[in-house]
Image (cartoon, rainbow, N blue to C red):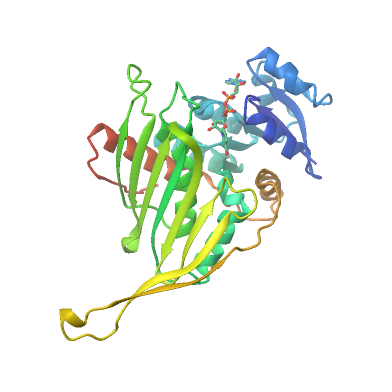
Amino acid sequence: MLKVGVIGCGYWGPNLIRNFNGLPDAEVTAIADLDEKRLAHVGLLYPGARKTTDHLTIVQDPTIDAVVVATPMSTHYPLGRQVLEAGKHLFVEKPMATTSDDCRALIDLARRRDRVLMVGHTFIYTPAVRKIKALIDSGELGDVYYVNVQRVNLGIFQKDANVVWDLAPHDVSIVNYLFGADPVRVSATGRCYVQHDLGIEDVAFLTLEYPEGRLAHIHVSWLDPNKIRNTTVVGSRKMLVYDDVSPAEKIRVYDKGVDVQPHYDNFGEFQLLYRSGDVFIPRLDTVEPLRVEAQHFVDVVAGKTELMTTGVHGLRVVQVLEQACRSIKEDGRPQDLAYAL
Ligand SMILES: NC(=O)c1ccc[n+]([C@@H]2O[C@H](COP(=O)([O-])OP(=O)(O)OC[C@H]3O[C@@H](n4cnc5c(N)ncnc54)[C@H](O)[C@@H]3O)[C@@H](O)[C@H]2O)c1
């Protein structure tokens, strides 16, 4: 039985506590939060778990094997470092840290201590994203040309990070996973419409260039009337739309495309043939992604399977976010991405 401590029980932490605690081979034995009221409220649901406002109580507890860090991103590195230095396995929420140097330091520490370091890129554990990956890898969509993402809603305006750091980690991690590659260049434009005085962007448009000419465009916003979670994947054979807000029919695969006539002698004969066939809605498992994610962490610690969202995966996402923000500051100038680690 893996004994787990959780640091941070604000909005997201309770979901992690519930899922880790619901696993047959894990138990949340301690919960920490600086906010006493929040701790007392969440703690009521877990009478068996120790509650503390001092996270060091968890970090220094020899009975705890692994620690989940679900605190604001600026605390991921200092807390994560303490967890690993104490010889415990670490599950850290996304984004892994606020700089790529801090990510590298955590990766290095985990290696030296031989501990598991997993980053909470939840979408990689969703049935929908896994289905899309399977469709791409099977060749069902043909050559994938580009991905277009909209992740927008009204709020919640963050004070310690812009909308790129808040929302785009999901999409960068998803597209990296789907393409099985990291982008080579990023350009971005963003604006601070609401928190202008704080210089915090609330709207941003990112363009990621991947190997083989593939593109991803990501629109993230806290300033939109509707909650939209739409991803379009366009391939040479088929196209699909993934609507994460849809309760039942999350993925629609369109047998649509355009073919160029293979032979033509002059421009007058150049013809495009439009194809428009059936729409297919794949059945998806109804499993809760966080449960899959929590079980995966426990299985990796037990040596049963290989880690999917590694520290390096988390680092790659942070590198893209860093360069995207640099591009925003430089009026959209494209920034190269080099991955020495
Ligand atoms: N994977 C996902 O889909 C997903 C979704 C939402 C949030 N998140 C991530 O989860 C993390 C937390 O987000 P949130 O929305 O729950 O934030 P939140 O502000 O609602 O909660 C954070 C909690 O951490 C506590 N905290 C801060 N420093 C602490 C410390 N040193 N010791 C103990 N407690 C401390 C705060 O008191 C607060 O209760 C962020 O990294 C966020 O990006 C991930």
| The N terminus: image quadrant | top right
Place of residue 327 in the rendered image (x, y in percent of width and height, measured from the top left): 27, 38
Q: Residue furthest top?
A: 36
Q: Quadrant of ligand 1?
A: top right
Q: Residue at x 50, y 42 (%)?
A: 228
Q: Is residue 178 above or below residue 165?
A: below
Q: Residue furthest right?
A: 48
Place of residue 100 in the rendered image (x, y in percent of width and height, measured from the top left): 40, 37
Q: Residue at x 21, y 82 (%)?
A: 269
Nearest to the observer: residue 155 or residue 338: 155
Q: Is residue 319 visible?
A: no
Place of residue 279 in the rendered image (x, y in percent of width and height, measured from the top left): 54, 67
Nearest to the observer: residue 189 or residue 263: 263
Q: How many marks?
A: 0
Nearest to the observer: residue 45 or residue 189: 189
Q: Is residue 164 visible?
A: yes
Q: Residue at x 40, y 53 (%)?
A: 182
